[in-house]
Image (spheres, helix red, strand yellow):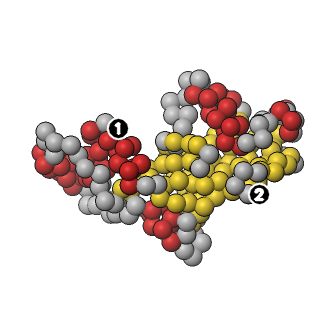
Amino acid sequence: MEITDLHRDPIAEFEKWFALAKKTDLPHPNSMALATASKDGKPSVRVVLLKEVDESGFVFYTNFESRKGDDLEKNPFAALGFHWDVLRRQIRIEGSVERVSDLTSETYFQSRPRESCLAAWASEQSKEIPDRMVLEKRFDELRKKFENQKIPLPPFWGGYRVIPEQIEFWIEAPNRMHDRFCYQKQNESIWSIKRLAP
């Protein structure tokens, strides 16, 4: 692949690759590694699900009081990694992070299955619990509490947007002579593109 084969806009290029991934038999083509770091620089990584992407960034949802939420409140930068082995492709994204609006979080929350909404309320994400029964009991209590009514958005739950500053596209090639292309944001509408050695 050559730079001239790429779209000048990395979000448009991402959407093209993402569309290919969604056509595969991968169970969760929107799964992505999310790396954060604490205020003193200790890294942490986990897999989350991409729920929205547009020109403003990449959105996922979580408990704001989780470890990732704590990291992002104190150090609002993150990296994302997509790996689609069946396509022999991966994408790396780095950027700053902001919370999405309450309205955006509310809209997404209400689109989730009811049980997932209850689980968001039931789990004090990343906190220690003595056993699974504590979680199950809390879930059942909430099921009864919200029976026959709309489940409200928890005040401690919502979305984050990773605003990309750098996006790298990687394609596997024979003899480990992979293609790597790195977009770097120059201003609101202009990105530079360079080829990197594998």
First reached walking from the N terminus: tag 1 or tag 2: 1
Q: Label 2, on which residue?
A: 186
Mark 2 residue type: Gln
For discs 1 and 2, the disc positioned in front in the rendered view: 2
At 82% from the left and 48% from the top, the residue drawn is 193
Q: Is residue 136 visible?
A: no
Packing grade of label 1 (10 A; few <14, some 14-19, many >=20) is few
At 86% from the left and 36% from the top, the residue drawn is 4
Where is residue 196? Give x, y as percent.
85, 49
Q: Label 1, on which residue?
A: 111
At 57% from the left and 76% from the top, the residue drawn is 40
Quadrant that contains the N terminus: top right
Relative horizontal placement of residue 98, taking residue 90 as reference (left or right): left
Residue farthest toward the front in the current orientation of the protein: 189
Where is residue 41? Give x, y as percent.
60, 72
Q: Secondary structure at mark 2?
A: loop
